[in-house]
Image (tube, helix red, strand yellow):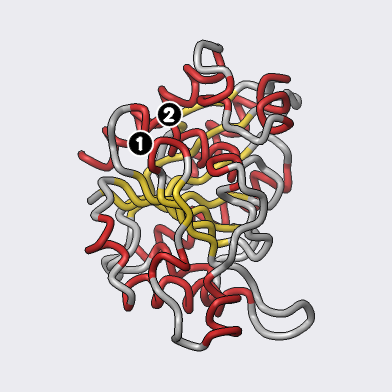
Amino acid sequence: MIKIAVYGKGGIGKSTTVSNVSAALADMGLKVMQIGCDPKADSTVSLHGKGRIPTVLELVREKKNDFTLDDMVTIGYKGVICVEAGGPTPGLGCAGRGIIAALEKLKEKGAYDVYRPDVVIYDVLGDVVCGGFSMPMRAGYADRVFVITSGENMAIYAAANIAMAVNGFGERGYAGLGGIILNRRNVKNEDEKTAELAKDVGTSVVGTISRSQVVTDAEELGKTVVEAFPDSDMAKEYRTIAQTMLEICRG
């Protein structure tokens, strides 16, 4: 089982990228599980088209431990197993704790043994890398961490912090840094700034995503680009990134 965590600043297009990668991997015939680790609980929406789905934290709050694995899971495009960790009641609790609770419940309910996914992808909000938000990069969860950024200064800053955290955790036997993915915003010197970031944190730019109306068009349909426009250039870009991630994780 290949385990991947994808981090990035909020609003950087992380969930869109992860969902398209999941769809591309499913098209390859792999069984994929995508776990949304963002309090907004919208990571998997374009994969299952059902709008908002129950989150693990909601189930814990409402039913304690009186719920099944099936209650936690929604099956999406080509069998992608969709899970949303969720967040605390607004104004109360810690979002990072929600991630910890969700991942612990998945293990407790035997999700990985029951569904036996070939690939597990954690979609993690990366404005901060502390407490529960660092959980997916710890031992036993992800094998590799990929960081999504644009050339915008705040995105670069967040990506650098995430990458440095991964490198620091690597000394403890946690997940290693897989590489940087550039999600273009067409800002000045974007490629150069992203390449410099990768060099500074000891990795490389392993994929690029063009800025395209096709992505917006797919989102308006409630689908991934890979599903809605499978023959588009954008779908090809996502498939290339999915294949690259596999190759890096397989070593």
**Residue neighbourhood size for the residue with mark 2, other residues' Cα within 10 Å, grouped as few (<14), some (14–19), many (≥20):** many
In the displayed structure image, the side of residue 210 where residue 68 appears, left or right: left
**Which residue reaches farthest bottom?**
64
In the image, what residue occupies the spot 61% across and 61% down?
Answer: 38
- Is 169 positioned to the left or the right of 84 in the image? left
Tell me the element at label 1.
helix
Q: How many marks?
A: 2
Q: Position of residue 112 (x, y in %)?
A: 28, 62
Q: Position of residue 5 (x, y in %)?
A: 43, 53
Give the camera-side residue of 165 and 115.
115
Q: Amino acid at mark 1?
A: Met
**Residue 48 vertical placement versus 224 (above, below):** below
Task: Verify CB contact (< 8 Å) between mark 2 and mark 1.
Answer: yes
The residue tagged 2 is 241
On the image, numbered disc 1 is attached to which residue? 245
Residue drawn at x 47%, y 17% is: 236
Hey, which quadrant is residue 250 in on the image?
A: top left
Q: Position of residue 202 (x, y in %)?
A: 40, 44
Res. 171 in view = no
Residue at image location 60% in from the left, 26% down from the top: 192
